[in-house]
């Protein structure tokens, strides 16, 4: 059963996404808002975003939590899974029962189930006929995405992709820096990568600075928050 969608909430998230086109916002702002909006308005529990570089190779550029990031990375590493299919076909893909997909994507199904996911919903990020990447949504309950939730997500994606076109390379570059910073913090403090990311994000929020800016300074200073 889907969570109720409050029309005012949908409008509020769409307005916030549109506002990221204003000078001073980064691509990461758009990605975070898209993931948060999709998760808060539906029964989605975690989300992630894959973006393609100029050679059409996909990269994980955002994950709401570590376990969704693990599933996304596994799809790229083993070159199988619904996110790749949605990107290649340019079509929204609903996977109502991940366990039933093991014949098509055995490694994806095993890893996704091990992380507690039972269903997935994949939405291509399309702009003027070009596929920029994929929004990957994960659920802990079986069943398809209902029409109302799917429509809300599609509406958010349309607004977000309008602001990602010129920021694509920026988003990819920022993600590389963030991943490097996570590695530095994980090694310095002896913590998992997920905890390292939480430290990074918490410091960015505490100091009211962009995540990529904090990450760049951590890499440059070899692990010290500045």
Image: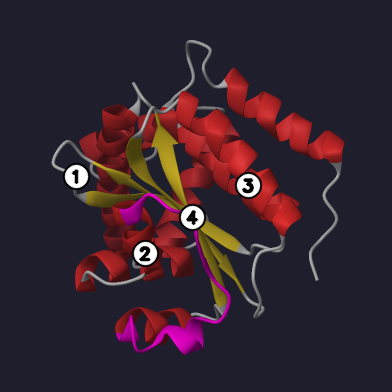
Pointers 1 and 4 in contact (CB under 8 A)?
no
Q: Disc 4 and disc 2: Cα gap in Å?
A: 17 Å
| Residue that carries the numbered disc 1 in the rendered image | 56
Q: Earlier in the sequence, mark 1 or mark 4?
A: 1
For label 4, the SS is loop
Residue 33 lies in magenta, yes or no? no
Q: Which residues are magenta?
A: 89-106
Q: Disc 3 and disc 4: Cα gap in Å?
A: 11 Å
| Residue that carries the numbered disc 4 in the rendered image | 92
Drawn side of residue 153 relative to residue 82, left or right:
right
Quadrant assignment, res 80 = bottom left
Q: Earlier in the sequence, mark 3 or mark 4?
A: 4
Percent x, y of residue 15: 69, 24
Counting labels gives 4
Mark seen at residue 72: 2
> Furthest-top residue in view?
23
Q: Earlier in the sequence, mark 3 or mark 2?
A: 2
Judge whether 32 appears above or below 123 on screen. above
| Residue that carries the numbered disc 3 in the rendered image | 153
Q: Disc 3 and disc 2: Cα gap in Å?
A: 19 Å
């Amino acid at each position: 059963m889907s969570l109720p969608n409050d029309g005012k909430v949908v409008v509020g998230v769409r307005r916030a996404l549109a506002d990221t086109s204003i000078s001073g916002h980064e691509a990461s702002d758009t990605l975070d808002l898209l993931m948060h909006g999709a998760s808060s308005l539906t029964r989605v529990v975690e989300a992630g975003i894959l973006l393609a570089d100029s050679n059409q190779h996909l990269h994980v550029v955002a994950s709401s939590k570590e376990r969704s990031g693990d599933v996304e990375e596994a799809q790229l590493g083993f070159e199988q899974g619904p996110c790749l299919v949605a990107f290649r076909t340019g079509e929204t893909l609903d996977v109502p029962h991940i366990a039933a997909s093991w014949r098509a994507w055995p490694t994806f199904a095993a890893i996704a189930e091990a992380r507690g996911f039972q269903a997935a919903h994949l939405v291509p990020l399309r702009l003027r006929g070009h596929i920029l990447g994929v929004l990957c949504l994960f659920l802990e309950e079986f069943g398809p995405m209902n029409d109302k939730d799917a429509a809300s997500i599609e509406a958010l994606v349309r607004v977000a992709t309008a602001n990602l076109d010129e920021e694509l390379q920026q988003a990819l570059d920022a993600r590389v820096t963030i991943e490097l910073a996570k590695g530095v913090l994980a090694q310095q403090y002896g913590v998992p990568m997920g905890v390292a990311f939480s430290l990074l994000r918490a410091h960015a929020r505490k100091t009211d600075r962009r995540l990529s800016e904090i990450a760049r300074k951590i890499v440059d200073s070899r692990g010290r928050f500045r």
